[in-house]
Amino acid sequence: GASAVKGFSSEGEYFLAIGQSVCEPLTGRETCLDRWAQPQSTLLQWNRVTNQFGEMLGMMDGDNIRLRGRRVRDEEMLLHQHALRIDAGRVVSWEYIEIKDESRQLLLASSLTDGAVLYDLSIPKVVGLGAVVGIVQES
């Protein structure tokens, strides 16, 4: 079940980090590692259209306002959702860290099986591709 939950906001969006474990709280580290594989933790994002936390959204209002001067249209909000699963072992707590000077967002998991695990949530964004006709990828 859920072993740790942390809600936080970043750039006007709301998120929920959920750690999961199949071990009881008082089960020792070695026993837990020997007997059970730990499920992955997850990061969910608030969806203003469905009024629920769900998979991560591909388009966010803050970015769309900066690029197009308006929020993401309701019908576009459900496009390009994706699951963000985090392999952090037996998570017992989360901490969200935002370094504004560097535009960095970090999520720190405290895990009984993996120790302190730091995830960089800073996602590179493409800006300024107005009127693009095509993009070619070279291998």
Image (cartoon, rainbow, N blue to C red):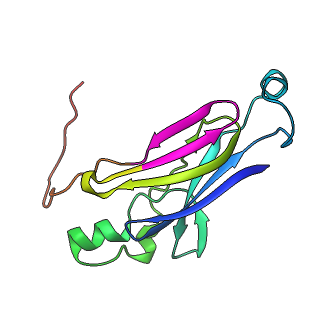
Q: Position of residue 74 (x, y in %)?
A: 44, 76
Residue 43: x, y in percent?
Answer: 56, 52
Q: Is residue 95 above or below residue 135?
A: below
User: How many marks can you see?
Assistant: 0
Residue 92 versus residue 129 in the image, above or below: above
Q: Is residue 119 above or below residue 5?
A: above
Is 66 placed left or right of 16 in the picture?
left
Query: Magenta region, mostly helix, strand or loop?
Result: strand
Taking depth in this image into account, of 1 and 48 the one nearest to the observer is 1
Front-lying residue, 66 or 19: 19
Depth check: 133 or 112 in front? 112
Residue displayed at 69% across by 52% down: 4
Q: Is residue 6 left or right of residue 71?
A: right
Residue under the image location 78 percent in, 28 percent down: 29
Q: Residue at x 36, y 73 (%)?
A: 72
* Residue 80 screen position, x and y as percent: 44, 56
Q: Quadrant of the C terminus?
A: top left
- Asked whether, in this view, residue 83 is left or right of residue 128, the answer is right
Viewer-proximal residue among 7 and 43: 7
Whether the magenta-drawn stretch holds residue 25 is answered as no
Quadrant in the rendering for residue 7: bottom right
Magenta segment: 106-121
Q: Residue at x 61, y 58 (%)?
A: 6
